[in-house]
Image (tube, rainbow, N blue to C red):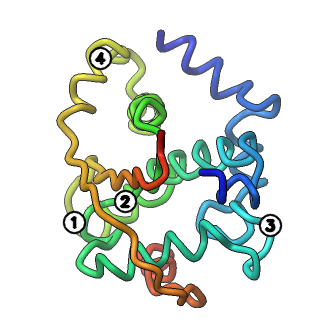
Amino acid sequence: MFADCQEWRRTVEGVGIDELYRTLDPFDVSFSFCGGASSGYVFNNMHSTLNAKRSLSPGHYGFIRYVVNPPAVRLILYLQLTALSQTDKVSQPTHTYETTIPQVHSLRCIFHTERPIHQCANSRTHRHARAL
Amino acid sequence: MPELYKHISPERFWQTLIVTAECGVREILPAASRAAGRPIDKGLCIVDLKGFR
């Protein structure tokens, strides 16, 4: 499974995770999601979410994930954890998908309702994440 | 989701999910760890299910 994960990272979307990461700026949601700030549906809704939950910040909780697909959450978190083991130079991985997913289930999730706050420019959240 | 997909293709949306997840381990968790002075290796998922079927 670990080898499969590494192979996925080399080949994902036909270019690999490194190239994909260079292509899409995860902090520039106006570009990454919508191709322009003026049309940013996700951009607006993401920031209204964050504005509605001001107590939540990447600096406090590590990172905030905005997703809509629970199975994708588990997959992505698994990929993160395997990538984390790589960055920590763990040559012999101690976890597999089967052992990781139960840990993922222990992560807290907050369910909430969006509020339409149309204020998205100059996100403090993004600057905060950049500044950390 | 229908409104979302007026602005972005499902493929592009999936790519942004991948990249967003990757930035957690590449940038945010290390930065949060440095800021906190201790390892930060946990995440908080906010799952917005509005419109999800």
In contact (CB < 8 Å): disc 4 and disc 2: no
What kind of residue is marked 4?
Thr
First in sequence, mark 4 or 2: give its number.
2
Q: Which residue is mark 4?
A: A94
Secondary element at tag 1: loop
Question: Quick one: A128 or A52, which is closer to the camera?
Answer: A52
Which mark, residue A11? none
Residue B37 tag number: 1
* Chain to which the residue tagged by mark 4 belongs: A
Query: Element type at marker 4?
Result: loop
- Determine the residue positioned at 30% across, 23% down: A101
Marks 2 and 1, Cα distance to the nearest angstrom?
Answer: 16 Å
Q: Amino acid at mark 1?
A: Gly
Of tags 4 and 2, the one toward the viewer is 2
Residue at the disc numbered 2: A63
Count residues near mark 4 (Cα–Cα under 10 Å), then give few for <14, some for 14-19, many for 20+.
few
Residues flagged by tags 3 and 1 on a common chain: no
Which residue is more in the foreground, B9 or A76?
B9
Residue under circle 3?
A35
The residue tagged with tag 2: helix, strand or loop? loop
Q: Chain of mark 3?
A: A
Whole-angstrom CA distance, mark 2 to mark 3, is 23 Å
3 or 1: mark nearer the eye: 3
Tell me the CA gap for discs 4 and 2: 24 Å
Q: Residue at x 22, y 29 (%)?
A: A103
Mark-to-mark CA distance, 3 and 4: 40 Å
Which x, y percent locates residue B53? 48, 39
For badge 2, the amino acid type reads: Phe
- Give the residue type that dot 3 points to: Gly
Circles 1 and 4 on the same chain: no
